[in-house]
């Protein structure tokens, strides 16, 4: 199937051509027709599947400004995302897919001064991408009215719950109009997720792609058994002997991320840590540096890294093993995007063996063990 078989407006097809998207991804192929018909949607998909375009394109098409109201534009689409990075990326996607439309989108999140956001809101926007806390803040201060919303997206619902946003979401939901199109995405499904979806969606279409256990198949994976105290030295050796020039390194804690970044920097490697204690500016700078390859190693915690979209990432290194097995699949899913293959190395200490076992069970494969080649 090609994009031009999906009944999208010509200006959207033009934007997609300019981005060199030729064929829709499975989530796009399955979601776009139903969304164009105005149906609610429950999507089980993770970042990297193309889910943003799957909801953004039909929304841009519905909001196309022909015959738009005169005067200040009301916000008609609200997208809630758990992290600033993801919110930024969604906003960027709306801007690039909607570049030939006159629709305006913007993003708001906490941790930065609100004045600029308020000024931009006052100018009138069509699409608002927000993290829940800052949205509630600005709603409570009277800067945001949601009574004209026609499209509502809750993205990465599972992560929202993990991050404790449920109370904020429950305060936001009743302030939205009843009659609207609702789109709900989650990478994983649990009874709590189904319950939340049930309070938002009306007779939804269900779409599910790349079950979490199968993304692992295109990524080459290896495990090295290394004790905790030896890991930092080991990492440096690994980078050297495997000739790794660009990788995300995952740690379990913010503190750990800082320590690994410091250690790599000390040995002359260009490394930056990215986690929730860093300022928004520092995180964006690190990410931009990593994308343009002036930074070789991005040391990240899971929450900070969620939603980061980096094309052509060849290596993921699990400095520590995540406690939740699905997280491993999210981490390694950052390589091997859009059909590219990637390599994931995992350093496993004796205390982490149980986590490794759970991961192997989830992905239904044994991760082969490796030992370090002599430099
Ligand atoms: P997402 O899952 O929405 O975060 O998208 C993951 C990445 O895939 C982003 O870099 C998108 O720009 C890219 N992408 C989305 N749809 C397509 C497509 N149909 N063809 C090629 N790349 C795509």
Image: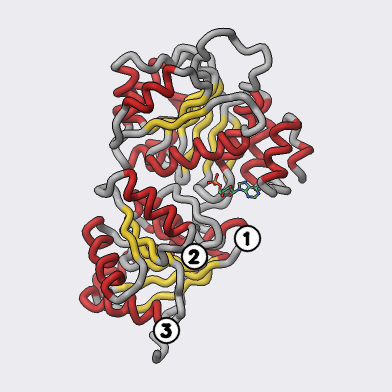
- The mark lying in front, picked from 2 and 1, is 1
Q: Nearer the viewer, residue 163 or 298?
A: 298
Q: Position of residue 183 (x, y in %)?
A: 53, 30
Q: Position of residue 51 (x, y in %)?
A: 56, 42
Residue for point 45% across, 68% down: 246
Sequence-wise, the earlier of marks 2 and 1 is 1
Q: Give the crowd class for mark 2: few <14, some 14-19, many >=20 residues within 10 Å.
A: few
Residue 193 falls in image quadrant = top left
Question: Pointer 1: what residue?
Answer: 339
The alpha-carbon separation of the residues under discs 2 and 1 comes to 21 Å
Check disc 2 and report its element: helix, strand or loop: loop
Q: Position of residue 327 (x, y in %)?
A: 39, 55
**Can residue 110 be seen at all in this image of the molecule?**
yes
Q: Which residue is farthest bottom?
A: 374
Sequence-wise, the earlier of marks 1 and 3 is 3
**Can residue 206 be seen at all in this image of the molecule?**
no
| Residue contact at pointers 2 and 1, CB within 8 angstroms | no
Residue for point 29% across, 31% down: 113
Q: Give the crowd class for mark 1: few <14, some 14-19, many >=20 residues within 10 Å.
A: few
Q: Which mark is residue 241?
A: 3
Q: Nearer the viewer, residue 149 or 353?
A: 149
The alpha-carbon separation of the residues under discs 3 and 2 comes to 29 Å
- Horizontal placement of 91 versus 295: left or right? right
Q: Give the crowd class for mark 3: few <14, some 14-19, many >=20 residues within 10 Å.
A: few
Up the image or down, 109 lies above or below 73; here it is: below
Check disc 3 and report its element: helix, strand or loop: helix
Q: Nearer the viewer, residue 47 or 304?
A: 304
Question: Pointer 2: what residue?
Answer: 364
């Amino acid at each position: 199937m090609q994009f031009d078989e999906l009944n999208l407006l010509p200006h959207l097809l033009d934007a997609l051509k300019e981005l060199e998207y030729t064929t829709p991804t499975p989530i796009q192929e399955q979601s776009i027709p139903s969304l164009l018909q105005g149906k609610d949607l429950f999507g089980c998909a993770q970042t990297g599947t193309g889910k943003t375009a799957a909801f953004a394109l039909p929304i841009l098409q519905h909001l196309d400004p022909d015959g738009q109201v005169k005067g200040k534009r009301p916000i008609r689409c609200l997208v809630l995302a758990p992290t600033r990075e993801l919110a930024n990326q969604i906003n960027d996607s709306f801007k690039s897919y909607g570049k030939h439309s006159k629709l305006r989108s913007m993003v708001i999140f906490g941790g930065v001064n609100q004045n600029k956001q308020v000024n931009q809101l006052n100018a009138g926007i069509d699409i608002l991408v927000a993290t829940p806390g800052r949205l509630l803040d600005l709603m409570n201060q009277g800067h945001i009215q949601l009574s004209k919303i026609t499209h509502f997206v809750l993205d990465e619902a599972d992560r929202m719950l993990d991050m404790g946003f449920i109370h904020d979401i429950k305060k936001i939901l009743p302030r939205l109009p009843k009659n609207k199109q609702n789109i709900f995405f989650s990478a994983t499904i649990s009874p709590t997720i189904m319950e939340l979806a049930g309070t938002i969606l009306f007779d939804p279409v269900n779409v599910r792609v790349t079950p979490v256990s199968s993304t692992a198949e295109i990524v080459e994976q290896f495990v090295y058994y290394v004790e905790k105290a030896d890991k930092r030295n080991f990492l440096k050796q690994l980078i050297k002997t495997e000739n790794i020039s660009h990788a995300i390194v995952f740690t379990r804690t913010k503190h750990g991320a800082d320590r690994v970044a410091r250690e790599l920097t000390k040995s002359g490697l260009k490394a930056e840590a990215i986690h929730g204690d860093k300022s928004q500016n520092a995180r964006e700078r690190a990410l931009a540096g990593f994308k343009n390859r002036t930074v070789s190693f991005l040391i990240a915690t899971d929450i900070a890294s969620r939603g980061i979209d980096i094309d052509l990432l060849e290596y993921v290194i699990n400095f520590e093993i995540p406690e939740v097995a699905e997280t491993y699949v999210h981490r390694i899913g950052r390589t091997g995007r859009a059909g590219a293959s990637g390599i994931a190395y995992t350093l496993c200490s004796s205390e982490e063996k149980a986590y490794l076992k759970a991961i192997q069970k989830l992905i239904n494969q044994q991760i082969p063990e490796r030992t370090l080649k002599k430099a």
